[in-house]
């Protein structure tokens, strides 16, 4: 008989494989014990919106709680644009690479320009504006960025300020995809707050799915001109949950204290521990990411060996003998010698340390 396969000790495939943080599950249990007004008008959703707006410092903004990131991007961008208008994005942007043409399916072209460390630059925007100048082409109207980027990098305040200044000059909207905004705001080197992002964008969303929630994103529409009839469009697109409290209760729990930021900071800390270990071992990295995504460059043999005891995403080819993989840490990533994860109680950690049969359940 062959040797027994090595049991996976951890998964680094993504930051949404776990169901939800225990406090959010408890909030759902408590919310489920009562009846609620439907369609996002329940007390939990209303309270969640109030907490988010207080953080943003934009009392005139609207908050709409939705199920997922692609749905949020599709709904927001298609609502904000007229039929002939287009989106500008970096060629690595999520809407241009990993959303199955969702934006194009609404009739809006995505114009892409090369990224710089995953980020969109004013020069890239200007180049696309110069290429699309008449009614024979689509009209650029909205600039799309994500923070963190697809490569785990973050925008500094001066970079968002430069993009917003260009948008104001050219009559463009600035929209920020915040699927991993928690990790961006708690990353080393970050100088932006949630209030800064709200002040610098016309609309953005706060990602819950990748930061401890069972599901859910909070679309924050800052500009009053973009707010009319959004609930009509949410309903028309099939995005209005009858049981809106499912998302509302979770965002209420995330923002009633510092939990949202604590979970993101933990994911970042675990990734930085991992990245530091790779560097110490002499493993080259595609990019130096300050957030919860790590991109090591490994030989094909190393990748095959690694796949034998953990899971990850194969990101891209690098050269003839090597490729890039992606390792992602989450709120639940934990090791016995690391600071306490917000996802596990001291009792749970102690029990698992003493019982090796259960150690493999820690992620």
Image (cartoon, rainbow, N blue to C red):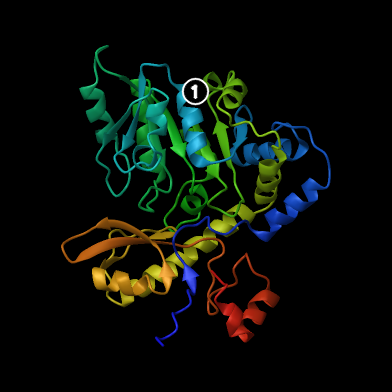
Location of residue 66 with respect to 276 vertically, above or below: above
The residue identified by callout 1 is 79
Location of residue 69 with respect to 291 vertically, above or below: above
Q: Would you call the spot at circle 1 few (<14 residues within 10 Å), some (14-19), or many (20 or more)?
A: some
Location of residue 231 with respect to 99 vertically, above or below: above
Residue reaching furthest to the top: 135
Residue that appears at 17% across and 61% down: 319
Residue that appears at 25% across and 62% down: 323
- Residue 346 lies, in percent from the top left, at 68, 75
Residue reaching furthest to the front: 1
Location of residue 317 with respect to 70 vertically, above or below: below
- Residue 179 lies, in percent from the top left, at 49, 45
Query: Which corner quadrant of the image does residue 113 belong to?
Result: top left
Is residue 202 shown to the viewer in this render? Answer: no
Query: Relative to 277, is 357 on the left or the right?
Result: right
Q: Nearer the viewer, residue 72 or 186?
A: 72
Residue that appears at 49% across and 75% down: 9
- Residue 336 lies, in percent from the top left, at 55, 79
Is residue 359 shown to the viewer in this render? Answer: yes
């Amino acid at each position: 008989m062959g040797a027994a396969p090595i049991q996976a000790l951890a998964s680094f495939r993504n930051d949404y494989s776990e169901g939800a943080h225990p406090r959010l599950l408890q909030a759902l249990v408590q919310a489920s014990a009562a009846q609620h007004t439907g369609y996002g008008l329940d007390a939990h959703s209303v309270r969640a919106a109030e907490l988010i707006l207080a953080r943003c410092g934009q009392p005139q903004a609207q908050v709409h709680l939705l199920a997922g990131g692609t749905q949020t991007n599709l709904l927001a961008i298609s609502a904000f644009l007229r039929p002939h208008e287009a989106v500008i994005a970096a060629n690595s942007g999520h809407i241009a690479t990993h959303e199955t043409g969702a934006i194009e399916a609404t009739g809006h072209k995505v114009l892409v320009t090369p990224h710089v460390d995953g980020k969109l630059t004013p020069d890239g925007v200007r180049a696309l504006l110069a290429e699309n100048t008449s009614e024979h082409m689509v009209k650029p109207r909205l600039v799309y960025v994500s923070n963190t980027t697809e490569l785990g990098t973050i925008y500094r305040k001066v970079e968002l300020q430069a993009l917003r200044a260009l948008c104001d000059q050219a009559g463009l909207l600035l929209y920020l995809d915040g699927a991993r905004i928690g990790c961006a705001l708690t990353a080393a080197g970050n100088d932006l707050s949630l209030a800064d992002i709200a002040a610098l964008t016309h609309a953005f969303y706060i990602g819950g799915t990748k930061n401890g929630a069972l599901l859910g994103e909070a679309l924050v529409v800052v500009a009053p001109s973009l707010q009319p009839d959004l609930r009509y469009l949410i309903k028309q697109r099939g995005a209005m949950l009858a049981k809106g409290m499912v998302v509302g209760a979770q965002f209420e729990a995330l923002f009633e204290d510092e939990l949202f930021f604590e979970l993101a900071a933990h994911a970042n800390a675990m990734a930085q521990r991992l990245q530091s270990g790779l560097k110490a071992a002499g493993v080259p990295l595609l990019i130096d990411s300050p957030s919860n995504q790590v991109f090591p460059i490994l030989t094909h043999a190393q990748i095959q060996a690694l796949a034998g005891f953990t899971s990850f995403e194969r990101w891209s080819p690098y050269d003839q003998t090597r490729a890039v993989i992606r390792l992602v840490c989450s709120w639940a990533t934990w090791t016995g010698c690391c600071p306490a994860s917000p996802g596990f109680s001291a009792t749970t950690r102690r029990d698992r340390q003493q019982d090796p049969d259960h150690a493999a359940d820690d992620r």
